[in-house]
Amino acid sequence: MGKTDCGHYVAREIPEASAIVADAGAPYRHLSILKPGAAPQSLDIIAKAGADVSVTFLIFPGADVSFNLRADLVGAGASVNLYGLYICGATEHVGIQTDIRHIVPGTFSNQIVNGVAGGSAKVLFDGRIVVAPDAQKTEAFQTNRNIILTDGAKVETKPQLEIYADDVKCSHGATIGRLDDLEQFYMRSRGIPEDEAKFLQLISFLSPVLADVPEGRKEELAAEVEAALRSIL
């Protein structure tokens, strides 16, 4: 497919030869576990008519890594869901980039990426949703939420939404903040130690991502995430 300029919209070439192609009737599930020493990960996905795609990634303390997802929804009824989390507590550099493109009418995508940064970690989230001209009835959502534990940690978030159709439901949002002092006060006033109160807040914050981990590994990975959070408190 060649590039065509439609006002400010420029179609990109879709790399069918190298991408993962998802079709109806065969749900595609991908799970990335990124720990110290992990190589950068990059996924190209083409979601054809009726495709059901779900991608989950977990970035653990000590991993200097990038995770990149590019998805083109080229068939009606295609859906792509992304769930990701990161936990950084030292000097990590983490980059997360997503580029989700709705090419035809009647497609759906949802992105939830939550993370915790402490120490002097540096994290960048760069997320884009593009709705092509005439891709009516698109539903596309993106949320990036971040908690900073220390003054030295830095998170930069760049949510982007480009819409070139007029009958769509789309939203995007990002937050960067600290743990809620009132919640901590409430728990500590009932005898919960400070570190345990912080842990309970953080595990609740990451639970929307853990909910999408495949059942066969959910218990194991939930325990690893809990241990990782305790290690950076």
Image (cartoon, grey):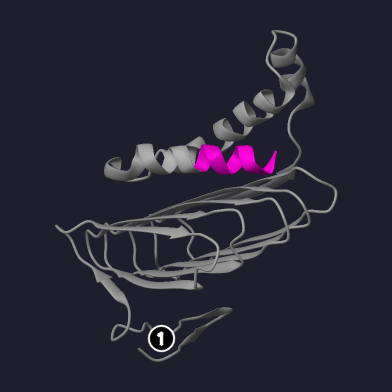
Q: Is residue 16 visible?
A: yes
In the foreground, 163 or 157: 157
Left or right side of 228 for 189: right
The location of residue 200, given as percent across then percent down, is: 60, 27
The residue most toward the right is 151
The location of residue 149, given as percent across then percent down, is: 76, 42
As displayed, is residue 184 above or below residue 85? above
- At 44% across and 39% down in the image, what residue appears? 222
- At 70% across and 28% down in the image, what residue appears? 195
Q: Is residue 14 magenta?
A: no
Q: Is residue 164 visible?
A: no
- What residue did someone put label 1 on? 13
Using a 10 Å C-alpha cutoff, classify the residue at mark 1 as few (fewer than 14 neighbours), some (14 to 19) or many (20 or more): few
Left or right side of 53 for 11: right
Q: Secondary structure at mark 1?
A: loop
In the foreground, 176 or 37: 37
Left or right side of 200 for 147: right
Left or right side of 88 for 54: left
Q: What's the magenta region?
A: 225-233
In the foreground, 127 or 186: 186
The location of residue 100, given as percent across then percent down, is: 46, 66
Q: Quadrant of the C terminus?
A: top right
Q: Quadrant of residue 3?
A: bottom left
